[in-house]
Image: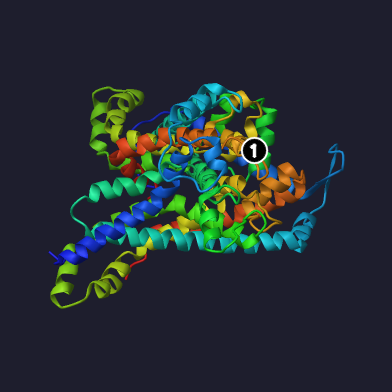
Amino acid sequence: MAERVVFRSVWLPWLLVAPQLIITAVFFLWPATEAILQSTELPDPFGLSTQFVGWDNFDYLFGDRYYRASFLTTAIFSLSVTALSMSMALLLAVLADSVVRGSGVYRTLLIWPYAVAPAIAGVMWLFMFQPSIGLFPYWLKVLGYEWNHVLNPGEAMSLVVIASAWKQVSYNFLFFLAGMQAIPRSLLEAAAIDGASPWHRFRTIVLPLLSPTTFFLLVINVVYAFFETFGVIHTITAGGPGQSTMIMVYKVYADGFVGQDLGSSAAQSVVLMLIVGVLTVVQFRFIERRVHY
Amino acid sequence: MVRNNSLATVLTHVLLIIGIGIMCLPIWLTFVGSTVTRAEIVHPPLPLWPGDQFLTNYREALFGGRQAPVLQMLWNSAIMAFGIAVGKIAISLLSAFAIVYFRFPGRQLVFWTIFMTLMLPVEVRIVPTYEIAVNLKLLNTYAGLILPLIASATATFLFRQFFMTVPSELAEAARIDGAGPMRFFKDILLPLSRTNIAALFVILFIYGWNQYLWPLLITTDQDMNTIVMGIKRMIPSADDYGNWPVTMATAILAILPPALVVIFMQRLFVKGLIESEK
């Protein structure tokens, strides 16, 4: 931390940090500690007392077929969301970067979907794909395909992936566009004079120079898919059919609030905290040493 | 200038328009769905052009009150979004000021405690946070909607970063002129941070408005629901046709405030987004 201390007071700095520290202690540290404690306890069936059980909740959790399945579901879900939204955004950013006229209008039209909440995105995509009234199932039926994500696990997964990815395209687009506009034009011009085709210029100049942005977005998108897509899942599939769209964050909620299995839910919270911890460290490592060629 | 022939330019524009079409299609169809009759929705396909029921559906959504108190929910969302934005900015400004301009025992500890909140999204520690909120009697209160979401490491870091770019001579001069720390904070630091505060406000307003899981748990009373979560109850289930037009009108109403913020404060929005993620 850089030293630039000018003011001296014993009590004032504490008064200044007090609001944030109190909020952090009450709503972050206390619940996190509770989660860790609860993850080693088992309440009796009436919820009157609890018993220390050590690693039992974790043993049970990792022995649970459904929990292991939700790991896989989460992996498939977050990789698909990340790949889909980033590639769509990159394509749009390349296009928007190359137009001169109207680029402001294009940019506005592409970033405003950022304002849509994940839950509202869920409602909108549900409306479009609702098996009995949706527009897309109707068109698909005309083409001879019977769409029903309420019964078909693959279709349910595709729908939540598309809805979640759609919501994130604007964000990725904005960062890709900013990254591209930071690339010196002279580099591209020099390559063009040397006879490099647009595709060649993109592959050998733009893409490598975008790698810091790409890596950053990779982490952000995985975090988004892990933690912020709850609203999409809850409005479209509620984890179903069966457990086919039960991502880990949704399972913490489903087991803790719907299933009332507090020990297991707390153990799942602890596992998720470890995952966020790793992702945060990765992100910060990267910010220290940016990925460069 | 890298030369583009005109065919390539036209093709780029066409592709961009197709891309925008894909991106805006869900919102367009939602809007169309909010302007037609129930009968038109029950018998697919949905028309691609808005119908004439705009006023009827929006009036029913806002004032009908049969399904859910939409006007009240919009109000709750506004309070929550404002509360979170103002609260986060206020506590972050103060703590960043303390961390940058004072040396006190435990400063590093404070810094790392705040840093740790980065690792704990509310979704992760949801059950114990809910229990604590219930114990503190925060169920169905605005404080319950706002307080747990206002601690934020990113806002504190952003202000810390910014304060460190402010020349230290300014603080030095203020001190020599006999201004106390709070005077310096109010008269010099705050005015200098205006753009940063505005940019952050835009981002945090959208963040607060779009919260879903926390309001879902903390508000059991319909009159305390926020619009983004309250809409969940209005989704017709698979086997009843419900009232999709009113649900879609509510969805549009839920999108409108943050969308207007993004469109009309685009410069601040972009600045806030890019800086808060650094």
**At label 1, which amino acid type do we have?**
Thr
Residue nearer the viewer, A14 or A269: A269
Percent x, y of residue B66: 61, 24
Q: Residue at x 18, y 73 (%)?
A: A191
Residue nearer the viewer, B100 or A174: A174
Q: Residue at x 51, y 50 (%)?
A: A135
Residue nearer the viewer, A70 or B40: B40
Q: Is residue B259 visible?
A: yes
Q: How many marks?
A: 1
Left or right? Give the position of B222 relative to B118.
right
Quickly name the residue at label 1: B129
Q: Is residue B25 above or below residue B205?
A: below
Q: Is residue A193 above or below residue B53?
A: below
Q: Quadrant of residue A169?
A: bottom left
Left or right? Give the position of B198 relative to A64.
left
Percent x, y of residue B161: 35, 44
Q: Is residue A182 visible?
A: no
Q: Pointer 1: residues within 10 angstroms few (<14), some, or many (20+)? A: many
Left or right? Give the position of B142 relative to B91.
right
Q: Residue at x 30, y 45 (%)?
A: A108
Percent x, y of residue B225: 59, 29
Q: Secondary structure at mark 1?
A: helix
Q: Quadrant of residue A12?
A: top left
Coloration mode: rainbow
Left or right? Give the position of B129 relative to A200.
right
Residue nearer the viewer, A13 or A74: A74
Q: Disc 1 sits on a residue from what chain?
A: B
Percent x, y of residue B228: 53, 36
Which quarter of the figure is the N terminus of chain B placed in? Answer: bottom left
